[in-house]
Image (spheres, rainbow, N blue to C red):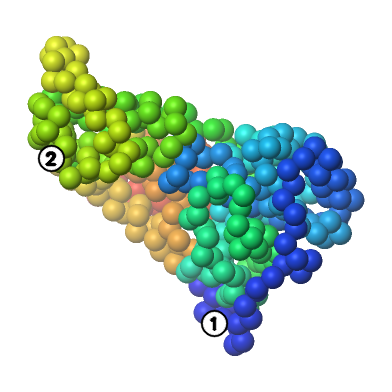
Amino acid sequence: MTESSESTTEAVVPLLEPREGIPPVVTSRQGLEATVEAFAKGSGPVAVDAERASGYRYGGRAYLVQLRRAGAGSALIDPIVCPDLSELDAAVADAEIVLHAASQDLPCLAEVGFRPRRMFDTELAGRLLGYERVGLGTMVETVLGLRLEKGHSAADWSTRPLPEDWLRYAALDVEVLVELRDVLHDELVASGKLAWAQEEFAAILAMPPAPPRSDPWRRTSGIHKVRNVRALAIVRELWTMRDQIAREGDIAPGRVLPDAAIITAALEMPRTKKALTDITAFTGRSARRHMGAWLDAVHRARTLADSELPAPSTPGEGPPPANRWPDRDPAAAKRLAAARAVVAALADEHRMPTENLLQPEAVRRLTWEPPAQISDESVAERLRSLGAREWQIGLAAHPLAKALDRLETKGIL
C-alpha cells in the first residue's frame, strides 16, 4: 500500500457541479464538428469515459461518451445519434487518453471509431501502486480529497432524454480524471513503477478482441446443479431461445428470463405449460410473454436423439481447475503451490495484488507444463509465450525458476 492510500485528505470536498456547468449533449453533426474543433485546439491529456446500459440492453454499446481536455472543457456526446467519432479520434490522435478501468470502455469506444494510441488507466495505476480500493469515486476521494456522487453508475443509459442529474454525474466522471492521472503519474515515478505501468497500458491497447465463447450456454449461473445430459440439453435450448429473443429485442438476457428459471426447468423437466408456469422464476412479465417458446424449447430437448445431446462438459484448452490437481497430477499441484508462494511474496514486496504482479493463468500454465529444462531463460521464455509483460518476467522468472528447480532437485518435478 502506498503512503497516500493509507490516509485520506482530512477535509473531503463534495464535487457537486462541473466547473463550466453541465455541457449540452451533442446530438447533431454541427455539434459534433464544433466538439472536434474544440478538442483539436485543446492541450494535454484527454479524459474519456463511456456509459453503457449493462443489465438493460443486449449488447455493450455506449449510450453516452464523456470527454474533457484543457482548453476545450467537457463534452457529452450521444453516440446513438452520432455513431461515428472517428473525426474526434483523429483530432486527439497524438494525445494521451485517460480512462478509468480502460478494458471496460475500450470495446464500446472502438465500436464508434474512437481508438486511443496512448493511454493512462487510473484504475490500473492504482493497483500497481497498492491502493486497496480502486473504484473511481474512492480514488478521487483518497488521492484528491474530492467526493464524487456515484448514484447513477448502474442506470439505464439508453433512456432518452437523459435526466439532468444523470448528465451532471456523467460530466463529473471526467471532471478531475486528468488531475487524478497527474498525481498517480508522479507516484509511479517516485515508486519506480512508471515503466511497468506504461507497459501494461500498451498491452491493453494491443489486446485483440476476445474470440466468441465456445458453448456460451455452459456459463449459465447454477449449471453445476445439472447432472445429466438430457437436462443439459434443456439448458442449451432455453439459453439459445432466450438469446435469440434478447438479441432481437435489444434486451439484456437476464431481463427476458433469469438464469434461475433455466436451471429449474432443466432440473424439473416440465411437460406442460402449467408445470412450467408453476416454476416461480417463470412468473415475470417478460417470461410469461414467451411461455410458448420456452415450452417448445423444453420439448425439443426432451425429444432429441441421444447423439444430439451435449457432452457432459467440454475439454478445456488449458489445465484443469486447480482444485483437481492433487488427484490428477500431485507433482503439478506442488509446483503450483510453490509458484503461488513466490508470486505472493513478490506482490507483497512490491505492494500490489498478486494478479497484477503476474497473471494467475500464466502461473497455472507454467506449473502444469513447465519447461523440460528449468532455467531462468526457459522460465522467462515460457512466461513470455503466456503473455507476461517484460517487467513481470524481470521480477518473477528467476525466483520461479529457483523454486521449480528446488522441487526438481527433490525429485518432485
- Nearer to us in this view, 166 or 110: 166
**In this view, 304 is above or below 347:** above
Query: Would residue 221 be visible to someone looking at this image?
Result: no
Q: Amino acid at mark 1?
A: Ser
Label 1 SS = loop
Q: Is residue 2 left or right of residue 114?
A: left
Measured as percent of width and height from the top left, residue 211 is found at 47, 29
Q: Is residue 273 left or right of residue 35?
A: left
Residue depicted at 69% across the width and 70% down the height: 17
Residue designated by label 2:
278
- Nearer to us in this view, 315 or 34: 34
- Number of on-image labels: 2
Query: Would residue 137 be visible to someone looking at this image?
Result: yes
**In this view, 3 is above or below 191:** below
Instruction: Locate residue 228: give its quadrant.
Output: top left
Residue depicted at 84% across the width and 56% down the height: 72
Residue designated by label 1:
7
- Nearer to us in this view, 263 or 346: 263
Neighbour class for label 1 at 10 Å: few (<14), some, many (≥20)?
A: few
Measured as percent of width and height from the top left, residue 352 is found at 49, 63
Q: Is residue 38 left or right of residue 342?
A: right
Residue depicted at 11% across the width and 30% down the height: 270
Neighbour class for label 2 at 10 Å: few (<14), some, many (≥20)?
A: few
Instruction: Locate residue 277: give its quadrant.
Output: top left
What is the spatial separation of the Cα atoms under label 1 and label 2, in whole angstroms? 54 Å
Residue depicted at 39% across the width and 48% down the height: 360
Q: Which of the two discs, 1 and 2, labels the residue nearer the N terminus? A: 1
Q: Amino acid at mark 2?
A: Asp
Measured as percent of width and height from the top left, residue 135 is found at 52, 63
The quarter in which the C terminus is drawn is top left
